[in-house]
Image (cartoon, rainbow, N blue to C red):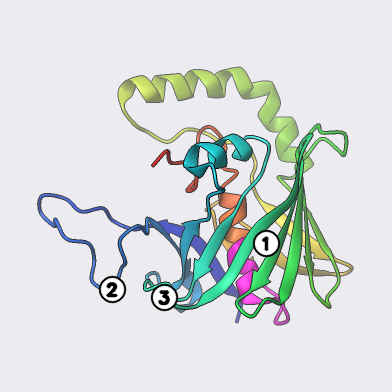
Amino acid sequence: MPSTFKVAALPKPSKARPEPLPGVAEGFEHVVVDASRGPFHVFAYLEREVPPGGIPAYLTARKDGARSFVLWAEPERRTRLATLVTTSAGGGVAEYQVWGGQGELIGTFVREKALSGKGLRTRWTVDQAGCPAAVGFKGRIFWWYVWWPLFPLWVLIAVGSLFNGGGDVPRGPRRIVWRAGDEAPLEYRSDDEVVAHAPWVDLRLAAALTAVVRSFDSWLGTPWDDRKK
């Protein structure tokens, strides 16, 4: 059975519910949910790892594509499922390594931004240790050809949506299908879910991929790691 992951925001305390949810440690705002096991099955608790300069330094490096975060197995932060670190970032190309809790390298991601010299679409390469590399491109060429001529219309709709205080805004093609030879082990769907189709995919890697792809959400989206506090 394929495993399906998505980033979910934890509900914040309110006047009706001033206390945090039971079992959720203070400081967590997002989790990776294994939707294939139930809509509320938490696979990992997401937390940024900020550099010595703190959150301002993280946000500055983030503009060049740098990311750094931990996937905790439990809210008490006892067990690291995986840690994502940036090995290089700049010029539209960023490379990341994903490490397991025992210090083992699980795999690497490479993101090559659209029009950065490598192609017209953003390219993601997923390389799991001991497995064939899988390459995926953001959106299908056909839908990009449909999208760009209508871009001025999408901008007007977005501006109108902001002034009206809500509403759905059309977004660019986002689906990514990673291919390794004749196999398609991973897929990112337009509903912000990553599906691990191949049984050999390390679920920790799939969860980290979900988190890093969602951190590159467009200006119309809500990246989970860009908060200023």
Between 100 and 176, the one nearer to me in the picture? 100
User: Is residue 76 visible from the viewing direction of this image?
Assistant: yes
Residue 69: % across, % down = 55, 58
Residues at badges 1 and 2 in contact (C-beta under 8 Å)? no
Which image quarter: residue 39?
A: bottom left
Amino acid on which disc 1 is placed: Glu
9 displayed left or right of 44: left
Residues at badges 3 and 2 in contact (C-beta under 8 Å)? no
Residue 71: % across, % down = 52, 67
Residues at badges 1 and 3 in contact (C-beta under 8 Å)? no
150 displayed left or right of 19: right
User: Is residue 196 visible from the viewing direction of this image?
Assistant: no
Task: Point out the tag, 1 or 2, that comes first from the N-terminus.
Answer: 2
- Look at the image and give the residue range highlighted in magenta: 197-208
Q: Distance from label 1 to label 3 (Cα)?
A: 26 Å
Of the two numbered discs 1 and 2 in the rendering, the one whose residue sits closer to the viewer: 2
Q: Residue at x 49, y 47 (%)?
A: 225
Tag 2 secondary structure: loop
Read off the residue under disc 1: 187
Of the two numbered discs 1 and 3 in the rendering, the one whose residue sits closer to the viewer: 3
Residue 7: % across, % down = 48, 58
Position of the C terminus by quadrant:
top left
Which image quarter: residue 40?
A: bottom left
Read off the residue under disc 2: 23
Read off the residue under disc 3: 74
Q: Residue at x 59, y 70 (%)?
A: 82
Query: Is 205 situated above or below 143?
Result: below
Query: Is 170 situated above or below 79?
Result: above
